[in-house]
Amino acid sequence: MTLAQRARQWKGLLAIYVQDGLAYRAAGAIWVLTDVATAVTMPVVWAAASRTGPIAGFTASDFVLYYLCMLMVSSFVTSHFMWEISTEIREGHFSTHIIRPVGYLEFILVRNVAWRLVRSLLFLPWFALILWTYSGSLGAVQLNLGPEFWLSVLLGHFVSVLFVTALAMIALFTQEAQAIFELYYFPMLFLSGQLFPIALFPDWVRGVALVFPFYYTTGAPTEILIGRITGPAVWQALGVQLLWVVLSLIAYRLLWRAGIRRYTGVGM
């Protein structure tokens, strides 16, 4: 298959899933509101706590900036495709992907781009409203919008989508995969920095966060953006992100090859 033919396939899939996302925009809006809730409440909590002095180097305006930037980064990075994949495997719809001329990972990546486009339409009005609400609490803002930040966002996105796609392959081995997915959110929320900046944790927790992939999805890009990671540490973070992209891709390939032999496609 030529690159032009593959590009037409991607374009067709993209159009289908953009339409699908718009058709189910109410469900998408609920996901967006869930993410927005953290950005609305947590700056208030930490801004109040830091009135007597900085906490781990964060002033009240720093906390507001951190959560606004985290909200923006996570909206373009964080993926949750394991739920849809698990449902399709359990109900037997996964069989259609096996016989399609498009590789399954290609399909997931194009489907993910479509959802990002729809999500942006749903998210940006809320973000503009939140930004306006907290504009008086931000103070002087200096953001690192250089190429290393955008590279970090791109790598963080690939870490997230490839990791959850590899995780979803567990559904090829067991019908109870969704219970495992529930457990995924506990370390993800804490170690990614989405609930709290990892600078607020004890040293041993920060050490754990820097080992697992969660921090390298949203935490690292956010801290690069606000200037808490600078100099050689930026390139170190980018290198670890790239490492997790490769490891997640390898894990996906291994689980795919082993799981596809066990898949029966009977549905439930």
Image (cartoon, helix red, strand yellow):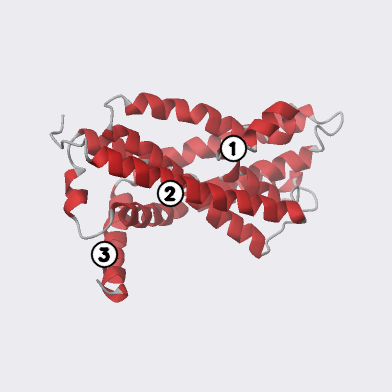
Which residue was labeled with disc 2?
249
Foreground residue among 101 and 116 = 101
Q: Farthest residue in the right direction? A: 53
Q: CA distance from mark 3 to mark 2?
A: 25 Å
The amino acid sitting under disc 1 is Ser
Foreground residue among 131 and 56 = 56
Question: With 248 as the anchor, is 87 left or right in this view?
Answer: left
Work out whether mark 1 precedes mark 2 in sequence or the reverse, and give the earlier one. Answer: 1
Q: Is residue 218 placed above or below 7 in the rendered structure? A: above
Which residue was labeled with disc 1?
192
At 40% from the left and 30% from the top, the residue drawn is 181
Question: Where, quadrant-wise, is the N terminus in this rendering?
Answer: bottom left
Q: Are marks 3 and 2 in contact (CB under 8 Å)?
A: no
Select label 3 or label 1 by which is in front.
1
Which residue was labeled with disc 3?
12
User: Circle 2 — which element?
Assistant: helix
Residue 17, image x and y in percent? 30, 55
Question: Where, quadrant-wise, is the C terminus in this rendering?
Answer: top left
Q: Is residue 263 placed above or below 108 in the rendered structure? A: above
At 27% from the left and 60% from the top, the residue drawn is 13
Question: With 31 as the anchor, is 6 left or right in this view?
Answer: left
Work out whether mark 3 precedes mark 2 in sequence or the reverse, and give the earlier one. Answer: 3
Residue 208, image x and y in percent? 64, 31
The amino acid sitting under disc 2 is Leu
Q: Farthest residue in the left direction? A: 266
Q: Is residue 154 visible?
A: yes
The amino acid sitting under disc 3 is Gly
At 31% from the left and 70% from the top, the residue drawn is 7
User: Circle 3 — which element?
Assistant: helix
